[in-house]
Amino acid sequence: MKEILKTEQVTRSFPVAGGDFLALKGISVTVPENTLTILKGRSGSGKTTLLNIIGALDAPTSGTVIFDGKDISKASDKEREVIRRHEIGYIFQSVALIPVMTAYENIEYALRLANYKGDYRERVMECLKLVGLSKRATHMPQELSGGEQQRVAIARAIAHKPKIIFADEPTGELDSATSLQVIAIFKELIEKEGITFVMTTHDTKLMGYGDVVYEIQDGEIINTEYHGKGEQLR
Amino acid sequence: MFRFITQKLLNKKWLILSIIIGNILLVGIASCNPMYSKAALQKMLTNSMGSYLEEKNVYPGILKVDTRLSNTLLKSNTSKYFQDYLAVNDTVENMFGESATYKVAFYENNSATNAKYEVSRTTLGDLTVKVASLTGLEDKAEIISGRMYQEGIDSDGCLECIVNEKAYLSKSFVVGDKIEVYGYNNANGDPLRLCIVGVFKAKDTSDPYWVNDPLSYRDEMFVPQATYVEQFLQPGNVQGNIRARWYLIYKYDEIKTENVESMLQTYRDLKADYESGSSQFYATCNYEDIFEQFLKDSSKVKATMWILQVPILVLLAVFIFMVSNQVIGIEQSEIAMLKSRGVSRLQLILTYLIQSSIVGAIALVIGIPVGYLLCHIFGSTNAFLSFVGRKAMPIRISGEALLYALISCIAGILIMTLPVLKYARFSIVEQKTRKRKSNKPMWQRMFLDFALLLLALYGYYDFNNQKAELMKAVAKGESVNPMLFFSASLFILSSAIVFLRVVPLLSALVFRIGRKFWKPASYASFLQITRDSGKQSFITVFLVLTIALGIFNANIARTVNQNEEDRIRYTDGTDIVVKEQWPSNLNNVKNGYETTLRYNEPDYKKYEDLTTTFSDKVSSVTKVLHEDNAGIVVGGNNVEGLELYGINTYEFGHTAWMPEDIEDHHWYEDLNALASNPEGVIISRNLMESYDLKIGDGVTIQRRNELGEVMGKKYMTIVAVTDYWPGYVNTTEKEGEDGETMMVPVNVLICNYDNLLLDFPVTPYEIWIKTTGNSQFLYDWAAENEVTFADFTDRTADVIMLKNDPYFQVTNGMLTITFIVVLVLCAIGFLIFWITSIRSRELIFGIYRAMGMSMGELIRMLINEHFFGSVLPILFGAGIGVLASKLFIPLIQIAYSPKIQSIPAKTVMQTGDLVQIGIVVAVMLCMCITVISVLLSKIKINQALKLGED
């Protein structure tokens, strides 16, 4: 199984009063292509810090991050912007839709930003269909429910056909039924679009859906689980 | 609770600081009104009384009651006359006495009576005397010989008296002389005998006590007042006619403005009382006209100050409301949370009321000194946005000022608390659901904005139609109609609100036109502006308002000043006009010793030399024959009383000034026409129209000399016609037979000076001097060269006088302050809006950044928003300001016009003011973009996104 992302001995420290706080203490993880990888841990464990680093939002203090065969750990802000724009998609816990744009426009905007080559309308409708919201295209974010908003955010994240999508606690504000729906969509997209998902969560009920599950505690990987497709990596 | 509130205040220090600034300005501006107007009016009152003294050489602070007392009249106890007599001392004491510096009664026998010296010196015959007494003479007179009189009849049966030095000399008295007055007895029935015990002179002749020149008492023998009353003024025992005068003397520079009205009223009541029935008393006062004029002027100054102040007070109120709204808006989830936890609405409001009161108290403490400072600024404003060092006015922080400060402070507190009423209604749930709704505001749905605009335009239309009445009202001394200002303000305000509709439409239009081409950044910002305009509406209105008002006010000030200065310059003709005292045989001619009036022309070359000796100060000089008693003969009619100019065309053109655009052609063309025809004459249009003359016609001009004698006649040809000429005013005010003042036209003739000399003798002419600024050098030069002027017109001095006029000072000061405050508010409001707008959108920026938008694009997006949210309103505001000026200023300036309009007024706009606003705005924009960039670069994407997690 091909790996799309790999880290080696990644550390990240933040300056705090009286010295540096080491949030990540040498993490090495591998994300196989076309899977759902879960970073599990309590809040403060360092999982979001790790997600920010592998998601090219932040740079590690030391160690390497290999994304799609390239080392991005030393990349400049500019280079990381380009990677984010074209190859990465994000989903956030809080509903992070642009409030002045309709569902349709939110998705289309991702295409604009990525300078997507192809028919915008067709792709937007395709994405909306994938998340089951074709009928909600012209609604403004505040007119949608929390689950619907998160689905639009997913559609937006996948619209420009990124290689990988990072989701930070995507089900954090949703009830369990809606959470399962979101995971189901992730799974479906992995199959249909060939995308790779990396998500953080502390919801133990969702662990079984991850192909690979890394458990993080105090900035270290303390346990790795494999399910389904991931079994072959074991 | 208090700790909680102070903590809250400190957390939002910048916003709170802005609110405090707003409140300080509110208190300062409100309180400076009574402080300034009081000081300015006091100065105005003192000045006008001072100039009365200077011009008429009569002390202004005097009220006089005059009567003749005689036995026949004082006998009939029931007559009004007797009542008045009994009352007069009482009246003097009580009705007027309190603030009067001196209360003087002056009695003397009505006509001089013969008397004889008891000690016979052969050279002396009989003499004439008046027995007199003056209250308080003992203190005001200095004895130069002998001693002061004593009361009562002395052992020798004489009344002691003193005389002034002039009487002493003219009547050849010796101290100790005794005289017997014929036909008069003392109270004991014995013949009246006086003993001269001393000679006096005034201690201080400039003391207002000396209503009459002390040396004018040539016949008066002054006896002590008590003695006089005892001897001569007992009812039933009054000898002959006694002239009695009661003077109330107020030191004019000590009269307080607040007493003016009551002093005037008391005088009028007294006068009315004396005039009714058969009173023989007469009351007159010197200050009546001054006070009347003062009351008229002061209400005008006060009204003007208020009218000019109201827009800025409203603007400050709006500003305070806006920023408070912003603060409370930030705290709204906090409010909603407190509400959900059972805090009552009243408690919430109370919390904010206390918070506002703290701010208000700070503003009150700082605001009053600020108001005091503002008064000094007013006092030193010379023109719009220009200041001079003037003698400071006696500005005092009065009780009235404190009251105004307190009222404005309370108003500020209420305005600050107002927004919380709105938010305190909602609990957390309601607040969240409310957030989702965004309807068009009520006033937009009801088209209130258009209604207001129409109302304002109607106001304009209405006033424009009543222009003539406005002029009449102003001529009567009324101040500008407040409704006119209100219409102008309403026009600006309603335009600003209408503009709110335009912004989203405009941006939507631009957005649609280029939908396909917009970069993602512009795309997002267009959507932001088009769909989220509600949040911006307040700042948009505020920006339009401030800029428009700033420009409008600047233009009012410029117009009023420029027109008035132009008028002065035009009516003066040039910078300095002097006329020397020409030696002549006038007295000989008058007395019949000579028949022909001749003048000796003073040396003119010394004036020509001024251009070389003062080459940096004098740019040109010319002689101008300028008379107002010329005449012409047309069609057999003799027309008299014409103004006549005899000029040297070339020099006159270089020296005199008049507006170039006042006629359809440049006035130099008329000069050229005159230059090319030595026998030519330029006449005024009113003359042409009255006698049906036309260019090319011939007229015979006749001149008279100082004594009114005809000097000769001369035939001339009309070469041009004009309405205006430097120094010439085509109408004048004359009192008609019915006592009404009416406007009569003045005709003018302008001809070549050299040509006049061919047929007329040399008569006194004026010297017109064009300077490059100050005129002081000429006074010095004249003193040095012993040149004395019969007339001296100094434009600079005339302009300074105008600038010192409280009416103009208030206008300039108020408008300047408004303009500066507008700029300050605009800058603060602008920064606050953008900073809070960015703070509240940090999350969105994080999302954009996460989606791969670069920092540059983000800033470009904000600049685009800036354009529609700030630059467009500013440009629109400028446009509205200019439009409002074009519409309303021609009407407003009427209030500042003199009765006789020498030249038509025009609306003046100085690009300099626009540039000034432009620079401030540009600096603001740059500052803003810098602040925004710094803020943005500080936003860590991951942190921004984390924000969303709470």
Image: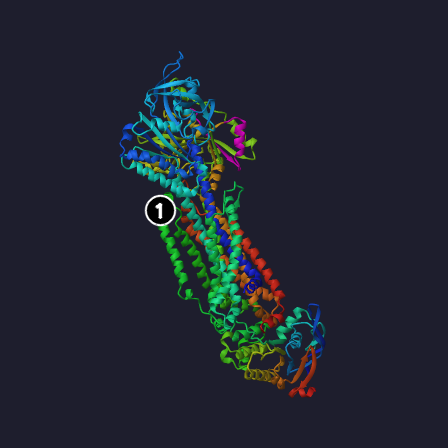
**Segment tinted magenta in the rendering:** B760-787
* Quadrant of the rendering where the C terminus of chain B is positioned: bottom right
Viewer-side residue, A59 vs B634? A59
Quadrant in the picture for residue B96: top left
Q: Nearer the viewer, residue B893 or A17?
A: A17
Residue B573 at what x, y percent from top left?
45, 36
Q: Identify the image's colour scheme: rainbow, by chain, secondary structure or one colour.
A: rainbow
Question: Is disc 1 surrounded by few (<14), some (14 to 19) or many (20+) residues within 10 Å?
Answer: few
Residue B864 can be seen, yes or no: no
Pointer 1: what residue? B468
Left or right of residue B866: residue B280: left
Q: Is residue B767 magenta?
A: yes
Q: Residue drawn at (47%, 44%), measured in percent from left and top?
A: B39
Looking at the picture, does residue B775 appear above or below residue B603?
Answer: below
Residue B811 horizontal/vertical position (percent): 46, 47
Q: Nearer the viewer, residue B876 or A220?
A: A220
The quadrant holding residue B279 is top left
Q: Chain of mark 1?
A: B
In x, y percent, where is residue A20?
71, 70
